[in-house]
Image (tube, coloured by chain):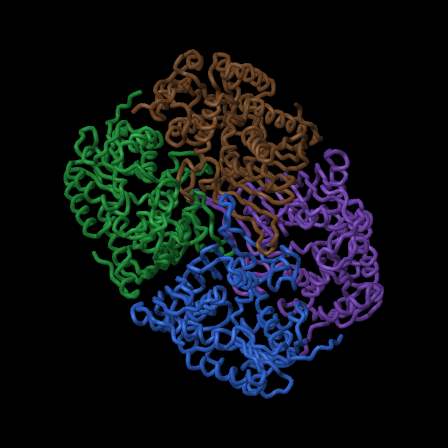
Chain colours: A green, B purple, C brown, D blue
Amino acid sequence: MTDSKPTLGVGMVGYAFMGKAHSQAWRTVNSAFDVPFTVDMAAIVGRNEENVKAAANKFGWKSYETDWHRVIDRDDIGLVDVCSPGGNHAEVAIAALQAGKHVLCEKPLANTVDEARAMVEAAEAAAQNGVRAMVGFNYRRVPAATFARQLVAEGKLGTIRHIRAVYLQDWITDPDFPLVWRLQKDQAGSGALGDIGSHIVDLTQFITGQSVTGVSALLETFIKERPLVASTEGLRGTGSEEHGQVTVDDAALFTARLSGGAIATYEATRFATGRKNGLRLEINGEKGSLAFDLERLNELELYLAEEDSRIQGFRRLLITENEHPYVGAWWPAGHIIGWEHTFTHEAYDLLTAIGDNTDPSPTFAEGLQVQLVLDAVERSAANSSGWVTVDK
Amino acid sequence: MTDSKPTLGVGMVGYAFMGKAHSQAWRTVNSAFDVPFTVDMAAIVGRNEENVKAAANKFGWKSYETDWHRVIDRDDIGLVDVCSPGGNHAEVAIAALQAGKHVLCEKPLANTVDEARAMVEAAEAAAQNGVRAMVGFNYRRVPAATFARQLVAEGKLGTIRHIRAVYLQDWITDPDFPLVWRLQKDQAGSGALGDIGSHIVDLTQFITGQSVTGVSALLETFIKERPLVASTEGLRGTGSEEHGQVTVDDAALFTARLSGGAIATYEATRFATGRKNGLRLEINGEKGSLAFDLERLNELELYLAEEDSRIQGFRRLLITENEHPYVGAWWPAGHIIGWEHTFTHEAYDLLTAIGDNTDPSPTFAEGLQVQLVLDAVERSAANSSGWVTVDK
Amino acid sequence: MTDSKPTLGVGMVGYAFMGKAHSQAWRTVNSAFDVPFTVDMAAIVGRNEENVKAAANKFGWKSYETDWHRVIDRDDIGLVDVCSPGGNHAEVAIAALQAGKHVLCEKPLANTVDEARAMVEAAEAAAQNGVRAMVGFNYRRVPAATFARQLVAEGKLGTIRHIRAVYLQDWITDPDFPLVWRLQKDQAGSGALGDIGSHIVDLTQFITGQSVTGVSALLETFIKERPLVASTEGLRGTGSEEHGQVTVDDAALFTARLSGGAIATYEATRFATGRKNGLRLEINGEKGSLAFDLERLNELELYLAEEDSRIQGFRRLLITENEHPYVGAWWPAGHIIGWEHTFTHEAYDLLTAIGDNTDPSPTFAEGLQVQLVLDAVERSAANSSGWVTVDK
Amino acid sequence: MTDSKPTLGVGMVGYAFMGKAHSQAWRTVNSAFDVPFTVDMAAIVGRNEENVKAAANKFGWKSYETDWHRVIDRDDIGLVDVCSPGGNHAEVAIAALQAGKHVLCEKPLANTVDEARAMVEAAEAAAQNGVRAMVGFNYRRVPAATFARQLVAEGKLGTIRHIRAVYLQDWITDPDFPLVWRLQKDQAGSGALGDIGSHIVDLTQFITGQSVTGVSALLETFIKERPLVASTEGLRGTGSEEHGQVTVDDAALFTARLSGGAIATYEATRFATGRKNGLRLEINGEKGSLAFDLERLNELELYLAEEDSRIQGFRRLLITENEHPYVGAWWPAGHIIGWEHTFTHEAYDLLTAIGDNTDPSPTFAEGLQVQLVLDAVERSAANSSGWVTVDK
C-alpha cells in the first residue's frame, strides 16, 4: 500500500530498554495518529553486530549499523533517535544536528552541564535551518500529565502553593545486587537523581509552568560496596566474589522553591521496598489540587474547592475520554493505555512539530534547565544541604 | 451538676454485643447532641445475675434486673431498649408499649412475619397515646448513608436504575467453627439473610426511597454439619466431637425489582474470605451514582454526570464536614467517627422524635416491610428461584 | 531484514473497533514475543472500498479486499481473522476452515446457538487436518486474569464459594442516544448480555475452572424507544426526529450455580452512570479471595487466609513482574500495559498453538458453551426469572 | 452500682476542642477497658463561668472551677489533665506535679524549649514520689500506629531506609480567614510546624524507634496579613476590616536524618487544598514497607518482600482484629473505630501505668525531644535551610 505523505527515515542509536520502547513508537505512530510523514524505520545502531542484527529483526528495522556515524552519513535518514547511555548523547546529537538531521534525544540530556550547554547551542544553530531537536521526557506525554498541565493553565487550581513529588523504586535493595553501569558515576552521571529524579523535576515544572529556582538537598548511598558484575545475562546479571565501590546516590531528597512561589519536596530513590515505578505527584493550589501515580497512569485525581462543601472530594478521573489529550487516537472511554504509549505520543508531537516547522517541546534548552537543577542538588548535598540557587 | 431538662429512664434488655453498643450510645448522647431529655441509664436486664451485674458496672447502668418484666413495671423507666435475640422481641416490645413505655427494638424486628405484624399493631395503638416505637436499623444513621438519601431526594442522581448491594463477612468459613445459636433456625430465624441481608434491604430502600416489590432468590448452606458447641468461652467458643445440622443459610443471593423501576442484586454471605464487615452499595441513577463501603464508613463516592466530560469522576467525599448529617456534633472536618456512633445517632433521633411528639423512623411498620422482603426471598428460594411478589 | 521463520499471511475481515485492535496485535506480536511465524499482514476486508483502503493504509495492511470470499481464495493467506458483526461470523469462519485456513473469530462466537453449533462442527473437522480455530475472548489474556486462573489451579484459594461479576458501562444512559445497530436484536443478537455479559461469563469460568450449570435471570430495557440514526459521523452519530423500538436488553442480571459448587451473581449493564469499562470480579474461596477491575487491569487483589491474623489483608499485586504471565515480554516491573495488549497476547497464543500443532483455547466449543449460558439467561428472563438449566 | 476499685478524681483544664475529646475519653475508659481505677470526672476548669458551666453539664463533669489553681488544691482530684493552650502548659503542669497530682499534658509539651526543660525536671522529681506525667501525643494510640511500631520492632521491615511523612490540612487557604490565635506566634508558638508537624515527628520516631538527629528546613507563610477577628462565633469566626500580621508558618518542609540511618522528608501545611486531616506516613525498610493515612485510621498498608515475587503487594490490613493493639476492647472485626478512641486508649495506658507504678510513655522527656526537633527546624529555616543538629 502507498501513502501520499513524504517519508521520514529514522536511524536509532541504541537497542536496549529505550531502544525497544522507541521502536514500538516508530512502528505504531502512523497507525494511531495522523502525522505529516510516513515513518521509515531505516536503521538501528549497536556496536555488537550479532545483537543489533537480532534487534533489527525483532523490532522491525530495515537495516542495522555497528557505527553510529553511518546513520549521520546515510541520505535515507532524516531523523536520529539517540537512545544510547548519557555519556554518548552530546557527541551523537551534535553530529546529527550539524548534518541537518532532526534529533530525538533520550533524557537526561547529557551527563554534564557543559555537554548539555554544547547541545543547546547546536540545537539552536540547527533550528535556524529548520532542523529540530527534542529531549525525551516522555512522562509529559502521559495523557493525565498533559491534562494536568492544561488544568493548571486554565486556572482551575489557582495559585500553586505546594508540590510534592516522589519517584520510588526498589530494584537494588538487595545488597547482593551487582555493581551495574547505572551504579557507576563515570557512566551514569548520577544514580537515582539523574535517572528518575530528573523525571519528577521536569514533570512538575511542566505541569505547574514554574521552574525550580533553589534547592536544599541530601544524597545517600545506603550500600557502599557491591559485587562486581560477573555476567550480564538475565534480568540483573550475576555478581562475582569481588566487590567495588558504588559511586552514585541510592536516594536523593530535596526541598525546593519555584519561580511562581510554590514550595516543594522531591524524593527519588531505589530503596523504597514494594514500589516498582512509583512516580507520584501531588500539587495543591489555592482553588484545587491534583494527584497522580504513574502505576495508575490512566487516572488523575482532581479536587476543586467549589461551592457546595457537602460534595467536594478528590475525583478519580479516568483519562480515557475523547476530550482528553492524545487518547482519542486510541480506544473508547474506559479502555486503558500503557506506559509505552507515551513514546508514541512523543513521536507524534515531534513529527507534527517538524511538519509545522516549529520547535518541539521539551527543547534541548529545557533539558539543560533540568540538568542545572540536578547540578544544584549535587552542590547542595556536597555542602551539607546548604541552600543553592539554580544556575541559568 | 444539674440540667433543667426532664429525665428519661432507660431500661435495656440484653447485654451482649448490641447491649454494649447501645450502652455506649446512652452514655454519650447527652454529651454529643442537644436532646430534649437527660438520659438516665436506669436498668440493664439479663437472666444470669453475675453477668448482668458485671455488665451494669462496666457499662455504667445504675441497677440491674434478671427478669425483663421488672423494667416494664418500674416507674423510673420510660423507655425500653430491646437488645435480646429476635425470638424475644415481640413479647418484650409489646408488653412495654402496652405499659406506655417508648421502645427501641433491635433489628430484625422479629423472627416471623406474624410476630412482626403483632408488633406493628401494638406500636400503632401506642402511638395514639404518644408512645413511640423505633426499630434499630442503625446503618441508616451512618452519616454517609443519611447523606446519600438526601442526595437522591434532591434529585442529584435522577431516576434510579440500578442497585447492587452486598454484605460480605467471613467468620464461619472454617468448617470447624461450632454450631452457635446464630446457625440454628429456631433461635436465629435465618442465617446471613436475616442477620445482614436485612441491613442491605433496609438501607437501599432508605437511600433510594423505593421498596422491593419482587424477588428471585437462591439460598445456600455450604457447610451442612458443624461441631456442637462445647464451651462459649473466647471469641468463637469451642466445638465438641459431636456434630449437628446447620439449619440456616450461609449465603443469600437475590435479584429484585423496586417500586420506582430500579433493578437490583443483593448478596449476603458469611463465606466471603477476607471481608470482615463488607457492606457495600452502589446505586446508579440517570444523572449520577453513589458507592459506599461500611469498612470506610466516613466516605461516600459520588459521581455526577455534569457538563465538562474531562473532569467527571467518582469523588471520594469525606463525610466529616459540618454540613453533613450528624457529624457537626462531633469533631472538625477530617476527624473520623466509628461504627458505634450510629447508635448514638439513633438515640438522638429517637429522643428528638419523642420530644417532638412525632413517630421516629424506621417505624415498626418499616421493620415489618423488611421482614416481608426476607419472607419473599425464602419463598422464592424454596421454589427454585421462582419470582415471588413481596406481600403487603 | 529477513528472518528464517515461515511466514503466515493474515486476512482480516472488518476494520472498525475490533479491526483496529487486531491490527495493532498483528503488527506487534513478532516484536514482543518469540512466535513460530513471521506475520504477514496480507489483506484487510471491508465492503466500502474507500474506507477499507484508508484502513489498510493506516493500520499497515499490504492489500485490501471488498469481498470476504477473496481472502478465503488467496493462497498467500493462511489465517482468517473474523472481526465483522456476529451475524456474519458463522458464514466466514466455516468457509475459511473448510478452505484450510486457521481462524480467529471475535466473540460472541455467533448470534444464535445453531450457528455456533455449526461452527464447532466445522472447527472439529478442520482440526483433523491441523487447521486451528480460536474464539477471541481477549480478557483471558489480561495477565492478571491468566494469573488468577493459575492461583485457583494451584489451590491457593481452596474450594471456590462465591463469584460476583459485573460489567458496567454507561454509554447509552442518555435517552437521546440514537438507535444504533447494537440496540437492534436482528443485528446484535442481544444487548448488554451478549456484548459484555458474555465476557464475564467466559472470564469467571476460565478463572475458576467451573462452568455455569443453571441461572435465574432478569433482563431490562429502560429506554424503550430511541431516535433513529440520522448520521453515523462522530462518536455516537446523530439522531433523527423519528423514533424506533429498542429490541435488546439495556441490562442483564442473573444468579447462577456453577459445576464445582460455587454460586454467583452476574450483572451486565449500559446504564451504570460513571462506569466506563467496569468489568469487576470477586471470587471467594475457602482459603483466599481475588478481586479484579478491568479499569486497573495491571492489578490483582489477593487475600490469603494465612496464619498470622494480624497481617492478613487484600494485597494489591501489580501484575508487571517477570514471573507473571505474558508481561516478561514487555517492560520492567511497574511499567504498565494497556487494554490493547490482550490482543497481542491472543495472537501470541494462537500462533504458538498453530506452531505446536495443538488446539488453541478458547476453542469454538468453549465459545458455544458461553452462548448456551446466554441462551439460558434469555429463557429464564422470558419465564419470569424461573430457574433454567444450561444446555449441553 | 459500685465497684471495688479505687477512685481517681480527674480535674481537666480547658474545655474547647481537646477538652471535649478528653471528656469523651474519661467518660468511656472504664466501660471499654479494664483499668485499675474508677475514673471520677471531678472538675472542669475554664475562665468564663457561663461557658465552663455549660461544658461541665454537657460533657458530664461533676463540678466546674474558673481558676485552675483550684484543681491543684482540691483533695478529691488526683490527676490533672492539661488541655489549655501551649503557653499555659508549664505553669499548670509543674504546679500539679509539685502538688503530687499525676499529669496528662496535651501536645506540644510547651511553646518553648526552656519551658519544656522545666517540665521535664518537675516530672522527674515527681516520679521519685510515684507521681506520673505523660504528654498527649494521641496518635501513638491509633491501633494501626501502635501495631506499626510492633512490626518494626519485630524486624518485619529490616533496617529502615526511608521515612516520608506529611500532615496536610487546608483550613486557612482562604485569605479572608481571620487572624485567630493559632496564627499568632506569641500564643501558638508556631504554626503548622508545632500544631501538626509535631505529630509526624513524634509518630515516625515512635514507629521506627529512631530519633531525628539533624534537619534542613524551609518555612513559608503564604498569606502574610489577615483580617483581625471580629467575632469568634461559628466555626471560623468572622473577620473585621482591619488586618494584622500572620506571625507563624503556614507550612513547614524539612529533610532529616535519623539515629538509625534512615533519611526522611517531613511536611506540615495548612494549605493542601482538599486534605482535611491528611496525616500520611510511608516507611521503607530493607525487607518491607508500611503506609498509613489518618483519614483511614483503621487501615494499615503493609508490604513484605517475601519469597514468591508473584504474590507480593501492599496489603490493606483492617486493624480491627482481636489480636491488634487496643481494638479487642471494642467491637468485632470489621467494625471500625473513630479518631476520638485514641484518647480513650491514652487514658487507658496512663491509668494502667499509674496502677503499675511505672512511667507512662510518651514521657515529658519525650515531649521535650520533639520540641528540640522543632527548634532545630526553626533555626535551620532562619538560616536559609542550613543543616542543623538537634540539641540534646
Residue B273 horizontal side relative to residue A363, left or right: right
> In the picture, residue B102 is in which quadrant?
bottom right
* Residue closest to the eye, A73 or A390: A73
Residue D16 horizontal side relative to residue D385, left or right: right
Please tell me which residue is depicted at 35% across the width and 22% down the height of the picture.
C4
* Residue closest to the eye, A47 or C178: A47
Q: Position of residue A2 (x, y in %)?
A: 29, 21
* Residue closest to the eye, B54 or B102: B54
Q: Is residue A273 visible?
A: yes
Quick one: quadrant of the N terminus of chain D? bottom right
Q: Is residue B40 visible?
A: no
> In the picture, residue D47 is in which quadrant?
bottom right
Tell me: residue D272, above or below residue C300: below
Q: Position of residue A309 (x, y in %)?
A: 49, 57
Q: Position of residue B331 (x, y in %)?
A: 55, 65
Tell me: residue B29, above or below residue B179: below
> In the picture, residue D264 is in which quadrant?
bottom left
| Total numbered labels | 0
Tell me: residue D346, above or below residue B121: below
Tell me: residue B301, above or below residue C247: below
Please tell me which residue is depicted at 48% across the width and 82% down the height of the picture.
D119
Q: Position of residue D259 (x, y in %)?
A: 41, 67
Quick one: quadrant of the C terminus of chain D? bottom left
